[in-house]
Structure formats: C-alpha cells, structure tokens
Image (tube, rainbow, N blue to C red):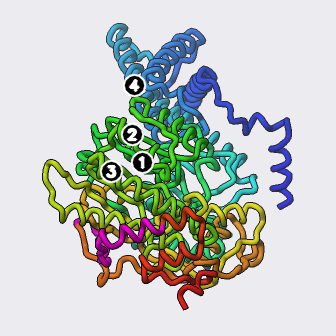
Amino acid sequence: MALKNLLFHLKSSETFTHLTSMRYLSRWVLLLLDITICGVSALLTLVLLRHFSSVQYDIKPIYVFTRGLALLAAELIGFWTFHTYAGVLRYSGYIDAVKLLLAQLISISLLLILHFIYLAIYHTEGFFFTPLFITAYGLISYVMLVSLRMFVKVIFDYMNISLQEQKRVVIYGIDQQAVALAKLMRTSYNSANRLVGMIDIDRNQGVKDILGNRVFQNDDKLVSRLKKHQVSAIVVPDRKTAQQHSESLSELLSSGFQLLVSSGLADMGRGLTNSERLQSMRIEDLLERPSISVNLDAVEQQLKGKIVMVTGAAGSIGSEIVRQVAAYQPLLLILLEEAETPLHELSLQIRELYPQLNFLATIADVRNKNRLEQIFRQYTPQTIYHAAAYKHVPLMEEHPNEAVLTNVGGTKNLADLAVKYKTECFVMISTDKAVNPTNIMGASKRIAEIYVQSLFLKRQADGNNEQQATTKFITTRFGNVLGSNGSVVPYFKRQIESGGPVTVTHPDIIRYFMTIPEACQLVLEAGCMGKGGEIFVFDMGKPVRILDLAQKMIRLAGYEPGKDIEIRFTGLRPGEKLYEELLGNKETTLPTDNKKIMIARVRKSDFDTVAPMIDKLLSISHEGKEFLTVKQMKKIVPEFISQNSPFQVLDE
C-alpha cells in the first residue's frame, strides 16, 4: 500500500505528468522511433548471425552505410503503405499488429528483390549477405515494433488505471453490445470507473473470461460474488436491455449496487469521456415496459398533408403529440395553448427540429368558444387531439368549478365546433381516474367522455350522409405518465436532490405508469383505428407500488432509503384512491388489432338526456356554487363517490 501511495504521488507530480498526459505523440516522432527500432534490429540480427552462423559477414563501413540506406528506404515504403505511424501508442491493438505485419512483409519482399538483383548482376554474395539475414531481421524487427506498442500501452494503463481510486464496475451481459462497451471502457482513461468483469445474464455454459475480464454467472450466488470482488456498480449496455431485465436489475439495486447505463455506442464519435457516457439509470428504465408496435402507415395516412390541431399543446402530453405528429408532415399543425411561455418554448423547439414544418402557435383558452370559432373558421382543422385539461386531483378538489368549466366546458366547445366545421376525427385524451371516479378531476373527465360519445351516437342515429358527415369522436384513457408536469417522479427527484424527506401518501398506494412517448404513440394509433364513439383504454402493464418507486429512485441516486433519505407518509390526499381500477380487465374491455389497445365497455348515455344536465352543470359552475356543482356532477355520473373529501356528505 505504501508503494502504491508513493507511485500515486509521483504520478501526480510535475516530474511525471508527461507520462500520463492525454496529448498524443506526434506521428513523425513515432515514425522516428520505428526507424530507430529497425536500425537496432538490423544490428542485433548481424550480431546474432555472426555468433550462431557459419557465414562470414563483411561489415566494412561503406557496406553498413549502403545497406542501411536501402533498409531505411524499404521500411519507409512499408510504413507509408499501411500508415503504421498514424495510430496512438496507448490505444494499440490487434489492428495495429496486423498493419505492422503487412508493412514488414512488404519491406522484406523489397529487400529480398534487391538482394537477388544484386546477386544476378555481380555474381557474388547478395546485397544483404544471405536471405537468412533478411528473414531473421524481419522477425526481430516485427517483434520489437509490436513490443514497443504493447509496452507503452501497459505502462499507460498502469499509470492511469491501477493507481487511481476508481469505482469497480461490471457490465450486465456478454453479448456483442456488451463486448463492444467493454472494449470502449478499456480504452477510456482518467475515468471514475474500472471494469473488473461481466455478468453472463443468459447463463451460457463455459464462458469464464472475455477480453481479460472475469465472467460472473447469473445465479443465486451472483450478489455475494460481486461483493467479494468489491463491485459497487452495474453497467447496462443500453436502455433497451435495462427495460428487458428490469426485474433482475431491481433486485441488484436493492442489494446495494449502483446502476449505470451507457448512452449508446452511437456516442463513440462524440468525444465523450467514460464517465460522461455512463449515466445513472432512470426510474423509467426499471419499469418493465414491453415494446410498442404502432401501425405507422395508418397514422401517416391520417396525418400527412392534413390540418391538425393539438389543444394543450405545450403540456406534457400535448407537446409530445405535437412532436410525433410533426414527423408525419401535416399540411398545417395548429398548437393551441393558453400558457404563453411554454408555448413560446415549444415553438422554438419545433422550429429547430422541423424547419420545413408549417405550424401555427396560437394563444387561446378552450373555455372561450368565440375565440375557438375564429380559429375553426379560418383554418378548419381536419384532425383534433384534445389534451387541454386540468389534471391535478388535490387542486381540482379545491376548485371544482374550474375543473368543470375547463374539462367539461372546454371539451363541449371544441366538440360542438368540430361538428359544425366537419372535423374528420376528434381524439380526446382522458384518464383512468374517470373509471368509477372518486374525485372531481376524474368525474369531470368522465362527463366530458359522456358528452363526446353521446354526441357521436346522436348524430350517427340522425343519419350519416354527405350533407351531414359525422365527426369521429374517439376517447383514449391511460394512467399516470412518467415525467409529466407535476407527476410523482420529478416530485420525488426534487425531494431527493434537496436531501429529503421523500413524501408518500400511503405505504400501500399503487398506480399504473406509462412513458409519455409510448402513451402518445397509442393515442395516434387509437385515433386511426377508431370508427367513432369508442373509449379506448391502454395496457398499462403491472401496477407499481409508490413506496417501491420512491425506494428505487433513492437507490438510483446513490442513497440508502431510511438511512440517507427519509421516507415520510403523509396520508391520502382529498379525492385520492388507494388503488386505481384495473383497466385491462377482460370482463370490461374488448380487444383490438393492437394488443396494447382495448375498447372499454361503458354505459352509453342518451344525448338528449345528458346534454341539458351538462348545460345546467356549466351554468351552476359559472355561478361559483361548488356544492351544487358537485351534486350535479354526481347526478350525471352516479358512480362518482367522493373519498377523503368534504363532498362526501353529498353521498350520504
């Protein structure tokens, strides 16, 4: 240990910093070194053959000079042909050894040709004494040239890796992607991570070593073996692998190992350091999410060359829908949003990502029907994705009138105008909280669903002809979206960054989660497959316990739950459910061509019955009468039973 500390001190001193400098050696200096090695090799060959061969060699100065010039010329031709001097010594490998071998073969061939031409002309000893000399020289020079590179590589590895205080890591996998990452890590210096092995996740028999790295078998003793070798972090080659093995990686995370994920081999050319290329794994990567298959042709057919409007365009869902729709080259993309600053930022982003896209950033409130009609009259959108809504459960429990005026009134305004201006397809973004709602937000979205579905059924029943084309009204429901504004993931992240505590409402509360891009992909396809009047629900995968989510996020940040970061339970919030409804229940859904999308079996409402009730609801909300508003909501949605809310008295 004392020797290692001494070497580390010397390495850090100014005297030895040139040994570990990241500056590369000039190619001309490397060429000079190679020529010098060739000269030494020639002298060594001559000395060895004089002692171990019966042939007598004439070493007059003139002979040494002329032969030396010829040898120099032949070597320069070989080196120049394969650019052996263009590499970096510390990164030398198999390719460099092959290039040197080919260069030496060319040089030896030229020397042999010169030797036999000289012999044919002067009928005396050849130019280089004997072919044995040339062959021996070629072998010795090749060994010494390769040895120089290996020596520099080993010394550099030792000075830059062995003497550093580094985190011992292993790569999760031994496939082609993992091996490529291992090669990359072996040549990444001044890194905080030191590769000490790889994990055979598929349990291939007989694999013990790859590129000099120990291969750990993925069995019951894996954790103990890793801890025995002082491994502190697991490196996953890419995010796809992380998602495919989320359960196993979660177990390793719970065992105290940090999880890192590579940004991908595509970043190799960006000049990133090892530490920059390896990032802490995100919680999204540990949620088991099977890949989504979307009918891209159908989506393109619906959107390409069309006028498309997205409401709530600058929100979490709306902005992602905008980005995905933009890729299908619509004739005009209308970004409708009330919030000025987020809309401006989205506009700058879209202009940068899609410079050829014709889009319009429009400030408008969905509650203002006159303003909406101006936009419909001027642009006549053919497809509408309605994502504008108030969504935060506790806030809407405190402001039920605002929830109704935006979520119900705003949807009604847009739906009525879509019918008036013959919009082809209207896709409403709803929520799983509309299923047997227990809060104002969920109930308001359920009423909006009822309105657009009953409106479609009413117009369909009245007759569908060219004079009265029926707008397709389609509703999509999904649960919590990871990373959306105000969602639990960024909330937990901020709490962890500030040192805690992380607040969870209840130890048993569970939720369904989906990433923003995959939710929006399914929204686009649902809009294509719908015939009108359907309420599509998405397969959200397995429910996630929020406490487990918090613990994983704390561990991913490098802390220990309960020790470094406290988890505090605060109690259920007003209107909050302990368990969300199972959206994938086969008894309440019908399958579609996409196994990730199902059609919900819901009670159908008569438009002539519910429309007056909704008008009355909006009128009461405008008057600001909260309890009367909620009472009217419960009449429209009888299954709306308030929980942990002052409006529970209305259910008695």
Camera-side mark, 4 or 1 = 1
Could you tell me which secondary element the residue under label 1 belongs to? strand
Nearest the viewer among 344 and 641 is 641
Query: Where residue 106 is drawn, which disc sits there?
Result: 4
Question: Which quadrant would the N terminus be assigned to in this image?
Answer: bottom right
Nearest the viewer among 37 and 210 is 210
Q: Amino acid at mark 1?
A: Val
Q: Is residue 466 above or below residue 531?
A: above
For residue 69, side relative to residue 107 (left or right): right
Q: Quadrant of residue 370?
A: top left
Q: Residues within 10 Å of mark 4 (few under 14, many from 20)?
A: some
Q: CA distance from mark 1 to mark 3?
A: 13 Å
Q: Quadrant of residue 63?
A: top right
User: What are the residue bounds of the magenta stretch?
Assistant: 593-617
Q: Quadrant of residue 290?
A: bottom left
Q: CA distance from mark 3 to mark 2?
A: 16 Å
For residue 384, side relative to residue 506 (left or right): left
Labelled pair 1, 2 in contact (Cβ < 8 Å): yes
Q: Is residue 409 in view? A: yes
From the top left corner, tell me how far across and down residue 302 is, in percent.
26, 47
Query: Where residue 418 is drawn, which disc sits there?
Result: 3
Write down the residue under mark 2: 333
Identify the residue at the far bottom of this view: 652
Labelled pair 3, 2 in contact (Cβ < 8 Å): no
Q: CA distance from mark 4 to mark 2?
A: 64 Å
